Image (cartoon, helix red, strand yellow):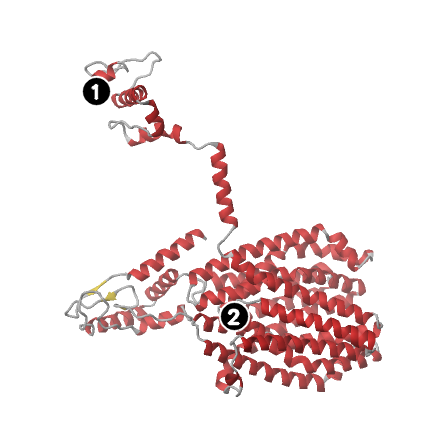
Amino acid sequence: MTTLCRGYGHSAHGQTRRQPFGVRLSSVGTCLLASRSLAHRLCPRQLSQQHWKCPLAPPAAIAAADAFGQEPSLGASFAHRLRRLQQAATSPHDKEILSVALPAFVGLALEPVVSAFNAGLVGHLGTHQLSAVSLGTIALNSCTFLFSFLLFLTVPEIAAAVAKKDDDEVSRVTAQSLWVALGCGLITAAMVGLNAPSIVAALSPPEPAVAAQATQYMMIRALAIPAVLLGFVSTGVFRGFKDTRTPLLGTGTSVAVSFCLHVLLLNVLHLDVLGAAAAAALASYSSCAVMLGAMITRGKLRLRHLATPPPVSAVLPILQRGVVLAARNAVAFGMILFASTLCVRMGSAFQASFEVIRQMWMLTMPFFECLNVATQSLCATALGHQDRVTARSLLNRLLFLGTGVGALAGVAVWAAHGPLIGFFTSDPAVVAHVLMALPLVCAFFPIDAAGSIMDGSLLAAKQTNFMSAVQIAGSVVQYALLMGIASSGRVDTLSVWVAIKVMGVARILGGAFGLFASRGSAYLPQQQQQQQQQQQQQQDPAAVTASAAAAAASSTSGGGGDGDGDGDGPTASTPASAAADNETTPDSTSHSSSHSSNGNGTSTHGNGNGTNTVPQVPAATTAAAATAAAVAAGN
């Protein structure tokens, strides 16, 4: 090696020579250059394919020497970045999300279109008739909106039964919900029909003729309230199966029947308001009949479960949770009415501008609500399978898609605000008021979308009470702001919509806490919940003492094991760990294993004598923790 290095600045005694360029090389550096030069002369082709390394060179020097030959080209780097961008922009869940969200979007978009078409047909009858139908529709929608909890509560129950592949449970849950809907529908229909004159009088119609026709409209439409509530349950059942096509079929049937009957009863038989009410009622019954028939023919509902009413103990939990959701709906609806009333008091221009912005806001709602439907269906199914990792991944993807769709909707509405406002009004005063608040509304579209998806995820996890409490608290803040605005005399379109958008902020903050920070969240990975459980036990000495005592008792009674780890030994679960599991994971199920947990990470195994206690993490727990950590890192 000394001879090899002489030509590169070394004597036979290893002394350093000055090179022609004045650079001094150490023995290692000289050998590195010599080895690479010799390799180039002997086998240049092989060196271009495989880097030859001198054994005397340090790894850092070799890495530095090889880095120049391994640097990727600009095109390869760009292609790599493009692939990473495509991976970030797509998800394996996208196909399933689209299959659920697209039919839901079509169904949600059809409803306002059909309502506008029917209103146009009634409008040709006269102003009084249109006002009467409008008043009656508002009152009836307010009544049925209170019972939308039948839809939201049915989805997770059906999804859990489907996950267990228990067809009898699916049929029993469906029958119980249908009986609740029928009972609520009959009672509500009777109350609305008997009190229709009082309800119309409370709405203060401008003319007696409008009040009389609105009363007739409500009395006939009230007969269809049971069908509407039964439709809520039917839609929830199919969403629990991740099926949004059948509800779309029901909506399409309702649209076709409504169109034909409106033309027949209004333009041919000239029944005016009575004909419009009859057409709307029969359309509701047609949609309900289609979905009920589909449930029976597909085996989702068995007549023997529907033959007898369920006991009170079976429907009481539904009613208890439903009351909370109904209160939330009533508070939210009342807040919108209060805001509209403030604008009415300020004049027709304020009221018109409020209505224009509300219509533009409602125009974008199907884009958000279809993702809400997908969140309820898909997350409820994943949680029904006890798959928190998939549920969390679905939620993150839906939040990403919803925020992106909301941002695009905000940009699109603002870019086309001229034609959109012109479609509703050409009054300069109304346009000025609309432009005052429209930028705020467009900017909040992403927040509205994310809040809607968070609501859907909480409903899928059966956290309805938490969601209702958050929104009721937000409504209280809204009422306080509106009262302050009214008392200060600063009511305008912008201030009213600022108060309305407080709810969006409340939904985001409450949803973020309930989904990602709360100990009771159904979307936290199991390992993270176990760590939080252990931290809580460390902070609570009484819980730790009870856990240790239970572990000692478990180890004393575990002598029946054979010591080979094959799972034949007796299994015991401690009260402390069971209580902690019930507190942090309310919807999880217990699984048998060959060890007993004492609540703080220590497992008790039989060793033939029944006295050996070793700290050990089960392989299943380790695999679950690794999966959860990988998903968390990817998120």
- Where residue 515 appears, x then y in whole percent? 48, 63
Residue beneath disc 2: 240
Name the side, left or right, on which 568 lies relative to 403.
Answer: left
Number of on-image labels: 2
* Rendering quarter of residue 613: bottom left
Name the side, left or right, on which 296 lies relative to 121.
Answer: left
Which of labels 1 and 2 is toward the front?
Answer: 2
396 to 253, vertically: above or below: above
- Where residue 595 appears, x then y in whole percent? 25, 68
Q: Residue at x 35, y 13 (%)?
A: 21
**Which numbered disc flags the more N-terminal residue, 1 or 2?**
1
| Amino acid type of the residue that numbered disc 2 sits on in the rendered structure | Gly
564 to 299, vertically: above or below: above
Q: Residue at x 34, y 24 (%)?
A: 45
Residue beneath disc 1: 1
Name the side, left or right, on which 303 lies relative to 432.
Answer: left
Q: Nearer the viewer, residue 502 or 8?
A: 8
